Image (cartoon, rainbow, N blue to C red):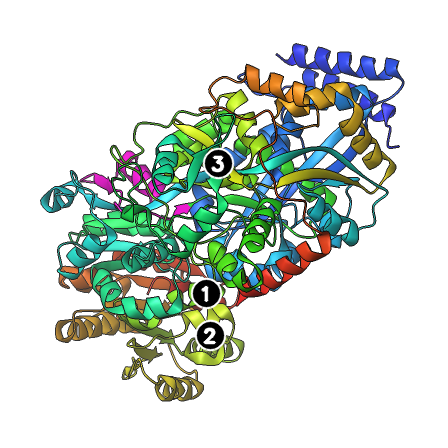
Amino acid sequence: MIVVTVLAVLGAAVGYLLAGSDPATVRGVVGTEKATFFADPRVQEAFEKHGLRLEIDARGSREMATTDALAGYDFGFPASAQAADSVSRARPASGTYEPFGSPLAVATFTSIVDLLAQEGVARRGGAGHWMLDLAAYLDLAGRDLRWDQIAGNVAYPARRDVLVTTTHPGYSGSAAGYAWLAATHLGPDGLDQVAKLFTDQGGLERSTGDPFERYLTQGLNFAPLVLAYEAQYIEAATAGTLPPGATLMYLSPTLLSTHTVVAFTEQGDEVGRLLATDPTLRSLAAEHGYRTGDEGAFADVLDRLAGAGTPLPAQLPEAAPAPDPAAFEAMLTTLDQHLRQ
Amino acid sequence: MRRTPRLVLAAVLLALATACTADPAPTTPAGGSEDPYLRGSGTLRVLAGSELADLRPILDEAREATGVTVQLTEIGTLDGIERVASGAAARDHDAIWFSSNRYLELHPDAGDKIGVDAKVANSPVVLGLRTSTAQRLGWDKNRPTWSEIAAAAGEGEFTYGMTSPATSNSGYSALVGVAAALAGTGRALTTDEITALTPRLQSFFTGHALTSGSSGWLADAYVHRQTAGVPLDGLINYESVLLSLNAGGRLSEPLTVIYPADGVVTADYPLTLLAGAGEQARANHAAIADFLRRPSTQAKIMERTHRRPAVTGISLASDFGPTDGGLVELPFPTRYEVANKLVSSFGDTLRKPARTIYLLDLSGSMRGNRLEGLQSALLGLSGADTSLSGELTRFNGREQVILVPFSTTVQEPRRFDVPSDDPRPTLDRIRADVQGFSANGDTAIYDALARGLELARDLDTADPGRFTSVVLLTDGERTVGRSLDAFRSLHAGLPATIRSVPVFTLLFGEGNVGEMTEIATLTGGRTFDARTGSLGAVFKEIRGYQ
């Protein structure tokens, strides 16, 4: 065992020495939903081929957007263009890159979707995929309907409100996007109801990776509806780690979240460029469930996907227009005041 | 560009050198299929809840694998929140590790004090009842709701131990769970709802017969009560604590774990870096987090500590329930004032009121700093400490506080009954009394203890519906009066309910550590070390046990 280790270290060292040098360490802070992507040895290897060794910390896309939180990193990689905007205001960027995106969706269970379909809140889309009708859902949430009040509900007869479990919109990009969709539908007078979508849930996590991991490990015991990026779900389906009976619903309309690299240093720029252009990294991103703009590649990933529990659409489902960054920030600031009251 | 070919060569030489010595640190997991361990160096200083103590053996393995020593400093829930939110925690620690950050995250100043976290495990707060009690109530077959549990406790169907919500996370989570379930709104609690729930929560706490500042001591005290012939029917705590007790071989009757039908609150054990931690601390945190979250370690944590895994791909052991139906997660408060209101209501209106007897050495050796420290500690509990933890650990409404100063002889006890409405005048009287202390004379420790327990017996006969406990502070050896042996035989002759009144002894000054430990063991109390920190901090810590 020891000998093997030493030989491996020697081998690696000789390799680097022959190549002229050891890979440079590049430090990045990324939204937790992308932690698994960066932990994939093939992703690490692809960067090492270009002389970069990545050290990654994962945290909420909006939480990372402070000067202190960004200190010492070569790049930040939040989950949305709006969060990237906040990041580059907290620390000036040398460049920004938009290598891929992923729509907001709700990770759930077939038994739950059946109940929501019965209530007229869930329906099938053209590709056979499930959609959560945002208007109908907001109406139902506004009525404080509980799961145990739905007729014939044996799947999850819990004395809890029908609510999507999210992260905190002040810290996390996915929850901020969801708040934007709700606020857009409910209009300027609806912000109290938007706040209630969060305060009624109970304690909120700070980053999207955490509730999704509990969806995977605890299933329906954790929550029946969990806000996630489509990519997280596809990644788990590929890895075979979805809980029994899992399925995905797209918010309708959804929001395409454009995961954006904000580079602070030359090496940070290099990471952004490689993610946007390197064929290996782009195909790995598609494999991890991200939409890189190449619909064919994405369709191939979906074709190879076994056990997703539901058809997923190769074409992006109906999405709301990308929010104006200033309006988006203004909405979140007001919402944050409501949440702290 | 940070290119470092020389360092690589050095690493190879180091690896060769290590391979030649007797005790190489493992760099790859034994299983072989996992990635090499991340390496750090030095110490990761972690402010931690007492609940994490059972992970120390795993942390020893983490040191072998990563080169990082994790140093845990134990602290109570509210003290921890306060230290993080004020920024004090970051001055001498790199990370925090509590069973949950949810209360902390509600603090308005905490948001920018905490950094990346790694969730290490899961464990729900549930009820464990002796199998015979569970069978008598039919709860081994049909899962009760928290409402049914509260009603049965109110009718005297069973007694239980539970940690203090002010000092321990499991007690706090239990309180959140039962309050959310009783409210039954399906949403996070509001302050008005807490007020409306008061009668039903009081009923629930009628069965609360043992309290503690930490989960570990609660389990020990449960076993002690069983041995002393005054057993409780059960415990409310993490599933992991209950399953560990069942596996530990100390119980005369196993606990049936009862998963309330309307839900639970689950701990997720986030190892959380503090904002502003240095480069080395970040690297160390990453290495430890990676070690703790890899499947081989997760499986060990599950097997040894009965916590559920935080990552996918590990099959659950068969002792995790429930066997039928789900385990709904109850909503945690989303507002800071709601979280605080739960703790303050617990003390002032919900809990079974306490009878706290303080035996206070005022012999000549206490003169000066020691007496001032004691006075300041008691003044703090009487309202002078206005910090969050001070507010929530002061003498509560309905509490009976009895001060018994002693030196050559035992003084007449001073009893203060703190009312729920307008406690201020009574607290002022306690303060005036404490300010009048003066130190003189010898040390009649065992006369004071005898007097304290006789007083407990008399008061308990007249008014049995209270938690009675004794605190003994002395800074020296017994010099006059009864001996330890004489006290021991007096203790043996007390009724069983009074024999199980815990005596909490302070290790202080030149006090006799052996005797203080023996008194604590004999009575089912515990010792608190006040030889280094402030008496004020220790008196606050003891509040969790009273």
What is the secondary structure assignment of the residue under circle 1?
A: helix
Judged from the image, the secondary structure of the residue bearing numbered disc 2 is: helix
Residue B64 is marked as none
Q: Is residue B95 visible?
A: yes
> Is residue B266 or residue B238 the one in the foreground?
B266
Query: Is residue B196 in the magenta section?
Result: no
Measured Cα–Cα span from mark 1 to mark 3: 57 Å
Mark toward the start of the polypeptide (2 vs 1): 2
Q: Are marks 2 and 1 in contact (CB under 8 Å)?
A: yes
Residue B244 picture quarter: top left
Number of other residues with Cα within 10 Å of mark 3, as a class: few under 14, some 14 to 19, many 20 or more: many
Mark 1 Cα within 10 Å, few/some/many (few <14, many 20+)? some
Amino acid residing under circle 2: Ala
- Number of the label disc, if any, that sits on residue B538: 1
Residue at which label 3 appears: A131
Q: Callout 2 environment at 10 Å: few (<14), some (14 to 19), or many (20+)? A: many
Q: Is residue A179 above or below residue B122?
A: below
Query: The magenta stretch spans which residues?
Result: B238-266
Residue B181 location (% of width, % of height) = 30, 55
Q: Nearer the observer, disc 3 or disc 2?
A: 3
Residue at image location 61% in from the left, 51% down from the top: A171
Looking at the rendered image, the quarter that the C terminus of chain B falls into is bottom left
Q: Which residue is mark 2?
A: B377
- Is residue B33 visible to us here? no
